[in-house]
Image: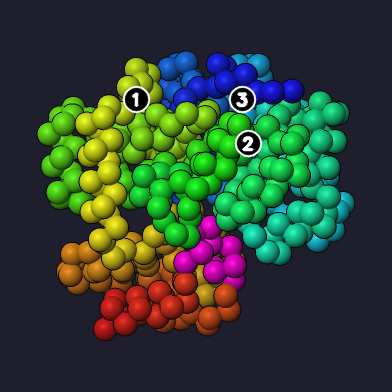
């Protein structure tokens, strides 16, 4: 059963960074955002078992599933192998996801965050690809695929062996196109080779591409005075052939409205726009920043309670602007209620789940030296 690309909205609502008040998902705010998104004629929602410590699935049940007819929206969820100890956990987790979301089927169901090594090997060990096909045959999911954070070589191997896969979700943005770790450009080429439609995550790289270095900012604003900097990142991805839907983890009304505006009357990149993006890529390559997207996979299992993405936000400010007062003040406030970078016990849990494969332990040591002195 192939996916009908004409029915997929170009902008997808990612449910990993929902609006919060005091670390509790703001239900009323989320309902407003869902309503605005649906009113704009868009209807694709993406969640996962672990988003917001399992609260994302429940939140979308309350804000969407209970308030709209099931046939009016598309919902994607994902199976996390790292939450499994044996093959029977596949069914247990899937049924819990159906219950949390309040649905009896998912439009798309993905194996979550496949990458090289034990992660991929465990998906094979627990026969998860066969499980996807079983769910589809039973009508409990309509379309099957996986999200991916591994190498182009592994992606090519999987797609060659599993022709049943209908869609793949990858991290792709102009900053990571040539990134030797993420390898967005090479992953894109593999998916085009296999003619597999793409769902795109991190198009604005965790919000870091919502702003640009001064030189690039000037180029963008002169070319399109009324366009946001974030819209350039979204248009870069949305202009690529084979891209089905671009996910955005929207947490504010302003982000929602700006993104809807970008895609409601979508304009592919012109040659001039592409030249500006190329110039921006060159500028970014010369910047010395931690390439954290704030996915927060690293924080859930940290035994010292370190808010690692926020620590890196402060560290990047020191690195980029050679300024200490503001980032240190931010860091002091942050660590009143969370662990300090110097509290790291080097257990490696964070590095084992980081999609960006960052040397987190080493970076926390640097952060401790620069922010706690």
Q: Name the residue under label 1.
A: 268
Nearest the viewer among 368 and 124 is: 124
Rendered location of residue 316, percent (x, y): 29, 64
Residue at horizontal 61 percent and vertical 54 percent from the top: 153
Q: Mark 2 points at which residue?
A: 194
Q: Name the residue under label 3.
A: 74
Q: Separation of disc 1 and disc 2 at Cα?
A: 24 Å
- Can residue 342 be seen here? yes
Q: Residues within 10 Å of mark 3 (few under 14, many from 20)?
A: some
Q: In this view, does 2 lie above or below 14?
A: above
13 left or right of 268? right
Asked if marks 1 and 3 touch (Cβ < 8 Å), the reply is: no
Q: Residue 355 carries which label?
A: none
In the rendered view of the protein, which quadrant contains the N terminus? top right
Sequence-wise, which precedes: disc 1 or disc 3?
Answer: 3
- The colour mode here is rainbow
Residue at horizontal 59 percent and vertical 67 percent from the top: 352
Rendered location of residue 55, percent (x, y): 60, 45
Q: Separation of disc 3 and disc 2 at Cα?
A: 24 Å
Rendered location of residue 147, percent (x, y): 61, 45
371 left or right of 299? left
Residue at horizontal 48 percent and vertical 55 percent from the top: 182
- Can residue 95 be seen here? no
Residue 317 occupies quadrant: bottom left
In the rendered view of the protein, which quadrant contains the C terminus? bottom left
Residue 371 occupies quadrant: bottom left
In magenta segment, residue 190:
no
Q: In this view, does 303 lie above or below 268?
A: below
Q: Which residue lies furthest to the front in this view?
A: 193
Q: Magenta segment, which residues?
A: 349-358
Q: Is residue 146 above or below residue 323?
A: above
């Amino acid at each position: 059963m192939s996916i009908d690309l004409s029915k997929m909205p170009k902008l997808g609502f990612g449910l990993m960074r929902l609006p919060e008040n005091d670390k509790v998902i703001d239900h009323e705010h989320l309902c407003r955002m869902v309503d605005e998104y649906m009113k704009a004629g868009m209807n694709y929602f993406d969640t996962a078992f672990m988003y917001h410590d399992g609260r994302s699935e429940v939140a979308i049940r309350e804000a969407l599933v209970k308030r709209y007819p099931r046939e009016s929206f598309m919902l994607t969820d994902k199976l996390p192998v790292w939450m499994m100890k044996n093959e029977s956990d596949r069914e247990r987790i899937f049924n819990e996801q159906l219950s949390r979301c309040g649905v009896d089927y998912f439009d798309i169901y993905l194996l979550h965050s496949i990458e090289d090594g034990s992660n991929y090997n465990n998906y094979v060990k627990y026969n998860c690809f066969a499980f996807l096909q079983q769910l589809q045959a039973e009508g409990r999911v309509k379309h099957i695929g996986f999200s991916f954070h591994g190498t182009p070589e592994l992606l090519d191997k999987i797609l060659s062996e599993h022709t049943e896969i209908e869609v793949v979700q990858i991290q792709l943005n102009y900053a990571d196109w040539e990134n030797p770790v993420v390898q967005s450009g090479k992953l894109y080429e593999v998916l085009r080779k296999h003619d597999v439609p793409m769902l795109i995550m991190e198009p604005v790289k965790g919000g870091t591409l919502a702003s640009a270095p001064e030189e690039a900012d000037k180029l963008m604003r002169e070319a399109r005075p009324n366009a946001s900097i974030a819209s350039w990142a979204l248009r870069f991805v949305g202009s690529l052939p084979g891209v089905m839907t671009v996910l955005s983890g929207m947490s504010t009304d302003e982000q929602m409205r700006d993104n809807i505006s970008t895609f409601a009357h979508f304009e592919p990149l012109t040659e001039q726009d592409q030249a500006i993006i190329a110039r921006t890529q060159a500028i970014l390559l010369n910047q010395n920043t931690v390439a954290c997207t704030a996915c927060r996979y690293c924080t859930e299992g940290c035994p010292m309670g370190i808010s690692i993405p926020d620590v890196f936000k402060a560290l990047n400010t020191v690195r980029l602007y050679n300024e200490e007062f503001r980032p240190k003040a931010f860091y002091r406030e942050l660590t009143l209620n969370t662990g300090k970078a110097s509290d790291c016990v080097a257990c490696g849990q964070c590095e084992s789940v980081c999609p960006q494969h960052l040397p987190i332990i080493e970076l926390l040591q640097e952060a401790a030296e620069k922010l706690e002195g």
